[in-house]
Structures are given as structure tokens and as C-alpha cells.
Amino acid sequence: MLKTLVLSVLCALLVATAARADRFSAGEDVYLSGSDADGTEQAARDLFAAGFGVRVGAPVGADAHLAGFSVTVSEPVEGNLYAVGSSLRLAAPIGADATVAGFSVETESEGRIDGNARLSGGTVRVGGPVAGALVLSGGDVTLDAPVSGDVWIAAGSLRFGSGARIDGTLRYAAPSQVEVPDTVIAASDVTYVPLDVGEGRETAERWTRDMPTPGPFAFVAGVATTLGFLLVLGTVLIAFMPVTVQALRQRAAGRPGLSLLMGVLGLSALFGLVPVSALTIVGLPLIPLVLLALVLAWTLGYLLGVYSVAMRVVDAFREGTAPQGMAVRVLALLAGLVVAVLLNFVPFLGWMLNVALVLLGLGAITAALGEALLRGRPGAGRV
């Protein structure tokens, strides 16, 4: 699923980046990108949409490939659905298979899936009928709709609603057995597999039991050293590459949704190079270089993301259009780094926002490199 989605959306976004268009059509396919990719234009064939908020607001004649923070399908998709994001909601029929992954996944009663369904998320609720098989994994899972085929579930907690019914067999893995009502499926068609979540916790505890815990002074010194390094590196880049940094900053701030998705694709490509290099004897010596490139890309993406957001805030409170001086830009970077570090102390949301900053900056870099490659002049195009 992930390979298909990444390849298809990457193709669409590289073309969209080169064309500098938020939406266009080619061969009856429709391509959408931007902070809000609202698909109100009917797609005779495939739909490719990426952005912060993605909504299928018109019928899709074939497949739909969607990626965004919030994804909503409110009009029918005649073919397959491939969707990934944070919050995903299916409120319209899917004519074939549906492959969906996110933090929160929900199919409503109108979200009928005529083929097989593969759903994965932190919280998953199936409220729409599934005509084929259902493969589902999640932390908190609720099945409240009929399924015509076999069902495979791996869940931290599992519940069955009043509308649940399984015509095939049920095989589920959970920390403990749950009561499956006879109205859902006969007991003879149910197979339970214990899910030992404690084994992973015990392994982690064994790894960390003997690790020394740094004191307050060492912790503060480590944070200050990291901040100092990032500030110095960022200042050098702003001073010696002002045009490039400014262009990348404007790209990230101008299309944040597209930059976030391009950051996911760029980071995925770098991570993917590690196993690919390990598969070949020739590529084994390149693994340290790939890891170094990954660390470098993460650092530069984080700096650019923090700087872009900080300067966006500065621009919102200033008057006139004259460019800011060097001192203001460095102070903005410092303030952004301090705020980003403090965000790490906010449970769950803090690290998500820091990762989003990495993806925002890395996405702008990835888009610029992709544009240069599409133009056939790597490094010579406008960044």
C-alpha cells in the first residue's frame, strides 16, 4: 500500500511542482495540491490529491490517491482508494478496495467498501459495510458494520457494535480474549491469537535498566550545546547563502501542505536507501554515507522549518516590504529554536510538531531538487 501510494503521489507532486499549479488535469486524471486540496472537480479517471486538508468533493471515475493531515471522502470513488494521513473519514462508497492508514480512521454508514478493506490506525472505527475481506490493525478498534468476507484484526482493544456482522471467519489478536456476540459470528468461526504487548515492554526495560540517567546539569548543558550548534549552523547558512535560504523559506511558507508531503516522500526515500544499499555487495560501503545524508537532511530540514515559521511570524507583525536585516533573521531563528525545544516537553503533540518542522523544511528542499531534476539541469534551476 505505502509503496503504491508514495510512488503515485510523488509522480503527481513532482509534476505539480514543476507546473507551479495547485490543480490541473492530464489524460482525464485530476491533480490537486496545496494547503487545502478540495476536489470539487469531477475526475473521469484517477484523482491525486495532497495537502494539509484533503477532501474528495466530486465523484472519481477510477482510483483516488490521497495524502494529507485531514482526509475526507464525501463523494463516491469508483475504483480503489489509497489514503494516508492523521485523520481520515470515509463518508461515501468505494467501488473497489480501500487501503487506509492514519492516526484516526473512521468509515461512516455511507462509506460502503465494495472490495477488500485494509485499515490501520491508532483509533479505527468501521461503520460502513465491507463487501470483501477486512484486514484491520489499531490500538482502539470498533467494528460496527457488516463484513461479507473474512476478517483479520490485531488490536490493543476490540469492541463490536450493534451493527457488526461477519459472514466469513474471524481471526483476531488482542492482549486478552473479548466476548464476540453470537449476532456477529458463530463461536466456531472465531480464532483468538494472544497478543503479548508486555514482551516488548520487558525488552525495552532490559535495554534501559543499566543505562545511567543524566543529571539536571548534564541535561541543560546538552540542550544548550545542541541549540548553540544549530544556531551557528543556521547563521552560517543565512549569511553565506541568503538567496537560496530565502527562496526555500518562501517555498515552505507559500505551500505548507505540499512541503509537508514532499518532506514525507523525501525522508522515506532516504530511509529506503539503507535497506536497498544493504541488499547489494557494491552498496554496502555506501551505507555510512546514506546514514550521514539522512542526518544532514534531518538537520537542514529542521533548521529550515524552524526558520520559515519564525520568519512567517516576524513578517506578520512588521510593516513594509523591505527585507529584514541579518540581526533580525538570526534572532528569529534563535527564538524559533527555543520554542521548538520547549515544545518537546508537551506530551505527544510536542514531538509531532517538531517532526512537522523537519518535514516542512525537508519538503521545500525536496521540491526544489525535484524541480531541478525535471528541468534536466540538476542544481541549475531556481531553488
Image: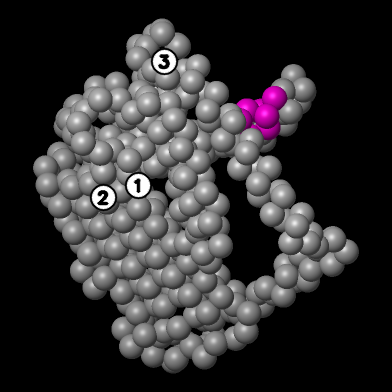
Q: For mark 2, give the secondary structure.
A: strand
Q: CA distance from mark 3 to mark 1?
A: 23 Å
Query: Which residue is nearer to you in this view: 237 or 377?
Result: 237
Q: For mark 3, give the secondary structure.
A: helix
Q: Amino acid at mark 2?
A: Val
Q: Amino acid at mark 3?
A: Leu
Tag on residue 54? 2
**Residue at x-position 25% and y-position 39%:** 318
Tell me if residue 293 is in the magenta stretch.
yes
Mark 2 or mark 3: whose residue is earlier in sequence: 2
Tag on residue 373? 3
The residue tagged 1 is 67
Q: Residues within 10 Å of mark 2 (few under 14, many from 20)?
A: many
Mark 1 or mark 2: whose residue is earlier in sequence: 2
**Residue at x-position 29% and y-position 55%:** 71
Residue 41 location (% of width, % of height)? 11, 42
Quick one: quadrant of the C terminus?
top left
Assess whether mark 2 and mark 1 are in contact (beta carbons under 8 angstroms): yes
Q: Is residue 333 above or below residue 378?
A: below
Q: Amino acid at mark 1?
A: Ala
Q: For mark 1, give the secondary structure.
A: strand
Which range is magenta?
289-296
